């Protein structure tokens, strides 16, 4: 019973951290603000996350758990990507937090920099594997899956930024499906 309560409290803290980071960015977020949001003292929060960096890593890992179901293991499919874009459109706070952290992580010494560097290397590898499964060694435009993978990741992230800036002007899932239609339906049978 105490363990379940501890896990519930931990999840509550992660949700609060997501909200605070979405509102203020990582550098503007404080442990005190997160603690206050969940009704804890800062000292109480430190019992669950001993540093701000530990909380940040937990937030990023949680986000990836929601997006990949714990890791795709190289089994991504185009249908999953379309579903993921639709799912993200239903959770703007999560997308906003991820986008704020991604943008901030390019600055020197940001604690999320290593996470995102590793994450994008893994994403490019998994997307290349998915594209190879879907299209073979060459996509309809002639690119190899390895050359197309960073472009696919850029489209997904770029759509998120555009959608966050003006959600009424961009239907993110529809725009992603439009992008996929650019690839054509020339997948090997």
Image (spheres, rainbow, N blue to C red):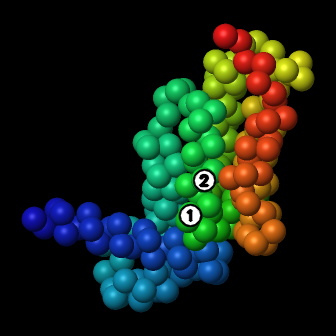
Q: Residue furthest left?
A: 1
Is the C terminus in the top left, top right, bottom left or bottom right quadrant? Answer: top right
Residue at the spot 58% in from the left edge and 70% down from the top edge: 93
Q: Is residue 21 left or right of residue 69?
A: right
> How far across and down, in percent of the image, does residue 65 sit?
45, 49
Does dot 1 land on a helix, a strand or a loop? loop
Which residue does the numbered mark 1 point to in the structure image? 90
Residue at the spot 63% in from the left edge and 43% down from the top edge: 82
Q: Quarter-wise, where is residue 148 in the image?
A: top right
> How far across and down, in percent of the image, does residue 76 sit?
56, 31
Does dot 2 land on a helix, a strand or a loop? helix
Q: Is residue 120 left or right of residue 142?
A: left
On screen, residue 84 above or below 138: below
Q: Is residue 171 visible?
A: yes
Q: Are marks 1 and 2 in contact (CB under 8 Å)?
A: yes
Q: Residue furthest right?
A: 141
Label number found at residue 86: 2
Residue at the spot 18% in from the left edge and 63% down from the top edge: 4
> How far across and down, in percent of the image, does residue 175 sit?
77, 51
């Amino acid at each position: 019973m105490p363990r379940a309560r501890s896990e519930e409290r931990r999840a509550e803290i992660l949700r609060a951290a997501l909200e605070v980071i979405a509102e203020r960015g990582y550098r503007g977020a404080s442990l005190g603000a997160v603690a206050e949001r969940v009704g804890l003292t800062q000292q109480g929060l430190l019992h669950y996350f001993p540093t701000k960096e530990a909380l940040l890593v937990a937030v990023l890992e949680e986000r990836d758990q929601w997006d990949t179901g714990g890791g795709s293991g190289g089994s991504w499919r185009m249908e999953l990507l379309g579903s993921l874009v639709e799912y993200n459109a239903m959770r703007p706070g999560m997308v906003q937090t991820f986008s704020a952290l991604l943008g901030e992580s390019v600055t020197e010494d940001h604690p999320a920099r290593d996470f995102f560097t590793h994450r994008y290397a893994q994403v490019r590898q998994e997307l290349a594997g998915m594209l190879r499964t879907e299209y073979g060694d060459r996509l309809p435009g002639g690119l190899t899956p390895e050359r197309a993978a960073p472009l696919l990741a850029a489209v997904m992230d770029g759509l998120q930024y555009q959608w966050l800036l003006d959600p009424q002007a961009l239907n993110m899932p529809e725009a992603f499906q439009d992008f996929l239609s650019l690839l054509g339906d020339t997948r090997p049978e």
